[in-house]
Image (tube, rainbow, N blue to C red):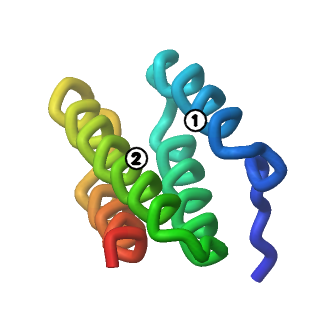
Amino acid sequence: MLIMRKYRKLDWFDFIDTMTRALNKKPEKEIYIEFIDELRMRKLESLSEGAAFKMKTKARELMTMFEERMAETNFAGEEDLAQVKELIEDILC
């Protein structure tokens, strides 16, 4: 499987800025999943407890935003929510 990481070369703060700008535009569910997956990959690569804490915090925020979008519109289905929850669990472990 080929993994495409669009945000890999961005440092943490540039990644957060990019994520914030994209999420303010109310993107499709795939963008949320891309950001969550990038957080998961960064956590895997991280050796720092502080970095892991930052990623867990952002993952929780993304989960909350995803659920809020689901509540307001026909944004995503239950299968999508299950996929997002699974990715988030990988980050929070």
Residue located at (61% from left, 69% from top): 41
Helix, strand or loop status at disc 2:
helix
Q: Is residue 52 above or below residue 75?
A: below
Helix, strand or loop status at disc 1:
helix
**Image side of residue 41 versus residue 54, left or right:** right
Relative image position of residue 87 (x, y in whole percent):
41, 68
Label 1 crowding class (10 Å Cα cut-off): few <14, some 14-19, many 20+? some
Quadrant location, the C terminus: bottom left
Disc 1 marks a residue whose amino acid type is Ile
Nearest to the observer: residue 12 or residue 6: 12
Label 2 crowding class (10 Å Cα cut-off): few <14, some 14-19, many 20+? some
Relative image position of residue 65 (x, y in whole percent):
30, 36
Whichever of labels 2 and 1 marks the residue nearer the N terminus, that label is 1
Residue holding disc 2: 58
Nearest to the observer: residue 70 or residue 88: 88
Q: Is residue 34 above or below residue 24?
A: below
Tell me the CA gap for discs 2 and 1: 9 Å
Q: Is residue 87 above or below residue 30?
A: below
Relative image position of residue 5 (x, y in whole percent):
76, 58
Nearest to the observer: residue 41 or residue 13: 13
Which of the 4 image quarters holds residue 47? Answer: bottom right
Is the Cβ of the residue at disc 2 closer than 8 Å to that at disc 1? yes
Which label is found at residue 16?
1
Residue located at (78% from left, 49% from top): 6
Furthest residue in direction top, as rendered: 25
Which label is found at residue 63?
none
Disc 2 marks a residue whose amino acid type is Lys
Quadrant location, the N terminus: bottom right
Nearest to the observer: residue 50 or residue 57: 50
